[in-house]
Each structure stands twice: as structure tokens, then as C-alpha cells.
Image (spheres, rainbow, N blue to C red):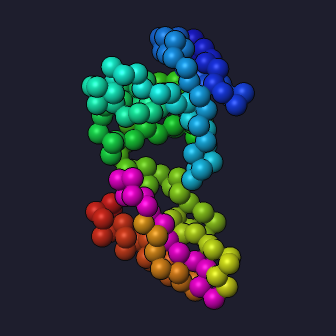
Amino acid sequence: MMKEIKLTKRKITKVFNKDFWLNGYNWFASLNGTKNHYYAIRTATVEERQKGAPTMIKMHRQIMGLVYGDPKDQIDHINGDSLDNRRSNLQIITNRKNISKGHRRSKYGLGVRCDKRCALKPYYMRIDVHGTRINGRYRATPEEAQQDYADALQEHGLV
């Protein structure tokens, strides 16, 4: 069975009954600007911080047991709904697999962005490597930026 936990900003998150104990914490809806998704997040307790937990704990990481885990491991919301934290919708994946799923696909291609303020060379690639954002040089065509993206994946061992 599924239960709902109320968050701030009039949002709710879905969990299975066995995870409803998380309702005992004060969760809030946090907007991730790069993905335009909300996530259920709470502040870590003093005891959790002393054990090495980050200041803010994401519900999906807590459900999957990655509160203190390797930050390179990520949780994928299989159906794309970042507030659906039922275990059947969550899977632990690597950064490499997350990139290959195409979450960062734009209409210009995977990893390619367009800055319309730059008329002559508006296209550039963007990649996130273990929490560090890397932007490429501005290019005249999306194909050139796509090649930069492919080169960056190769350079950082993500392919």
C-alpha cells in the first residue's frame, strides 16, 4: 500500500507503508533548478551529522540506504517523478548510467545547451562529473557542441 507525506509548497511525496515512519521528520519540497524537479529533503539531526551524514538528507537516498553512502552513487526515479519515493520506483545507479539514460537531453542533443545571447556561437556542452559542472566552449553548431560532449565523456571515463 502507498501513503503520502505532506511537504512544504503544497507538495506531497509517495512512499510505501513500510517507509511511512519517515513522516516523523519535517520534510520540505526543494526545487532542483537544473532539472526543474522537486525533491523531498530534510535537515539532518545532530546525531546523524556526527555519524557523517550531510546537512540535508534527501528522502530517496534515505529510503535506499545511501544517507552515508558514496556520493557517486545516485538514485534514479524510474518513472521520472522525483516525488514518487516508493521503493519500486527507485534504483541505485552510477553517474555514468544516469548520464546515459538521457536525463540531460535537450532539443539540441544530449548534453548540449544553447545561449541565445551569443548569436554567432550559441551552442555549448555541459556535463556534471561527480558533482562538478563543466561547460564547454561556445560553438557555431549543435553538432560541434555534441562532439565536445562526447570528448568530455571520454576524457572523464564516463563512456
Give the magenta-colored segment's residue range: 120-133
Q: Main secondary structure of the magenta part?
A: strand
Compared to 8, does 149 lie above or below? below
Asked if residue 112 shows in the view, the reply is yes
Compared to 41, does 133 lie above or below? below
Residue drawn at x 52%, y 12% is 24
**Nearest the camera: 146 or 11?**
11
Question: Quick one: quadrant of the C terminus?
Answer: bottom left
Question: Quick one: quadrant of the N terminus?
Answer: top right
Asked if residue 146 shows in the view, the reply is no
Query: Residue 49: percent from the left, percent from the top?
Result: 33, 27
| Residue at the extreme bottom of the image, as rendered | 120
Query: Residue 56: percent from the left, percent from the top?
Result: 45, 33
In the rendered structure, the answer to whether residue 116 lies left or right of residue 57 reads right
Residue drawn at x 67%, y 85% is 119
In the rendered structure, does residue 79 fall within the stretch colored magenta? no
Residue drawn at x 35%, y 53% is 130
**Nearest the camera: 22 or 159?**
22
In the rendered structure, the answer to whether residue 95 lies left or right of residue 116 reads left
In the rendered structure, does residue 125 fall within the stretch colored magenta? yes
Query: Residue 57: percent from the left, percent from the top?
Result: 44, 30
In the rendered structure, the answer to whether residue 146 lies left or right of residue 14 reads left
Q: How many marks?
A: 0
Residue drawn at x 61%, y 42% is 31
Query: Residue 15: percent from the left, percent from the top?
Result: 55, 20
| Residue at the extreme right of the image, as rendered | 10
